Amino acid sequence: MDPENTLQLSQFDFDLPQELVAQYPLKKRDQARLMVIDRQKQAISRDIFANIEKYLPPGSCVVLNDSKVIPARLLGRREKTPGKVEIFLLKKLAHGDGRFYETLIRPLNRLKLNEKIQFNGGSLTAELIDIHKRIVRFNRKDVAAQLKKHGHMPLPPYIKRPDEPLDHKYYQTVYARKPGSVASPTAGLHFTPALLNQLRKKGHTIETVTLHVNYATFRIVEAEDITRHRMHTEEYALTQKSFQAITAAKTKGSKIVAVGTTSCRVLETIVDRNVRAQNFVPLRGTPWGYTDIFIYPGYAFRAVDILITNFHLPRSTLLMLVYAFGGTKLMKEAYAQAIREKYRFYSYGDAMIII
């Protein structure tokens, strides 16, 4: 393990002034500030995200997470009383006919088993069929279509405002395709279609993976010895075409650029399960599965060469991954500089690239 790193939770803590937590997105996505972290030179410089291409080696393979955020918050009322109820959909359950969901419910302690919650005047209802597991059954199968009409974007808890129409656009990457996340893979929020086209014209390849981000991504690590922390499980997949393209890029020595910690975790999960002698091994069929990979200082990255990410919560597994990739000492200095220079933090905040 790198002697500069420690596995004590306190090493991943820092004080962040509340005013640095971005509450709204920039109207021009690619105008976010970009902190450039050069591991070889142990240097930190500044730019804007629109200039990201100049930090990519020729012929890089840029890997995006194409998961799409679903409007997973529903605001309703109890069927027989005027009490308000908020339901946050965590996961559609595999059994049944698409009407069963694991949820968070507020206020759960006031509800009774088999009680129904009404939305939109009763055209959509959810019956609480398991209080302990917080499972509801909707009265209709077209839940996804109903969410588009009546759902609210699941903004993270540190954004202290109700969701607004602009969040349906800006809390979504421009390349989001596959619905399933209840939190945005935020490193990708800075890309525009024009910027992606620029990368292609410059000779970089762009591939996608899918990892549906669940609400546990906001969970803070509590164990002082972080090796005792147990990661939540998230579903991932990528097409055979993307897998083969990433394999080919890695084999010929092209740099693999992970856009976000989600893409990074997918790539490191796949390489961990399928690498022999430091090379990708082609798979048959569509690579998919579940990952609970926990990356913290001391981890040896085998797939990812460059990481694009945002500024993360203290004591979070996302911050630990970034420290592991950039080196604890250098990343602590980067975060200290970002705070002094009033960078915007978290989901709607500024970005960094670690090269």
Image (cartoon, grey):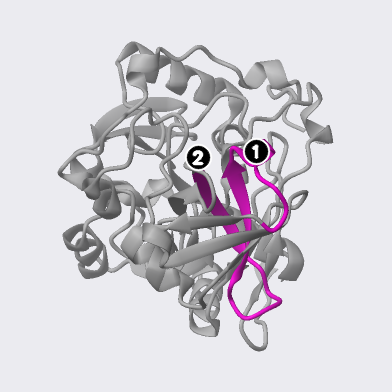
* Residue at mark 2: 83
Residue at 33%, 36% (x, y): give it: 162
Q: Along the horizontal axis of the image, is 219 left or right of 148?
A: right
Could you tell me residue 261's position as x and y percent?
Answer: 53, 48
Pick the residue in front: 195 or 29: 29
| Magenta segment boundaries in residue numbering | 85-114
Q: Along the horizontal axis of the image, is 321 left or right of 260?
A: right
Q: Along the horizontal axis of the image, is 44 left or right of 77?
A: left
For badge 2, the amino acid type reads Gly
Q: Is residue 159 above or below residue 307?
A: above
Disc number at residue 62? none
Q: Are marks 2 and 1 in contact (CB under 8 Å)?
A: yes
Residue at 58%, 76% (x, y): give it: 98
Pick the residue in front: 105 or 353: 105
Residue at 50%, 11% (x, y): give it: 15
Give the SS element for disc 1.
helix
**Farthest-out residue, front:** 80
Query: Quadrant location of the C terminus?
Result: top left
Give the SS element for disc 2.
loop
For badge 1, the amino acid type reads Arg
**Quarter occupied by residue 164:** top left
**Farthest-out residue, bottom:** 285
Q: Is residue 270 above or below residue 281?
A: above
Residue at 45%, 50% (x, y): give it: 76
Could you tell me residue 44's position as x and y percent?
Answer: 38, 26
- Magenta stretch: residue 94 in it? yes
Pick the residue in front: 344 or 216: 216
Disc number at residue 110? 1
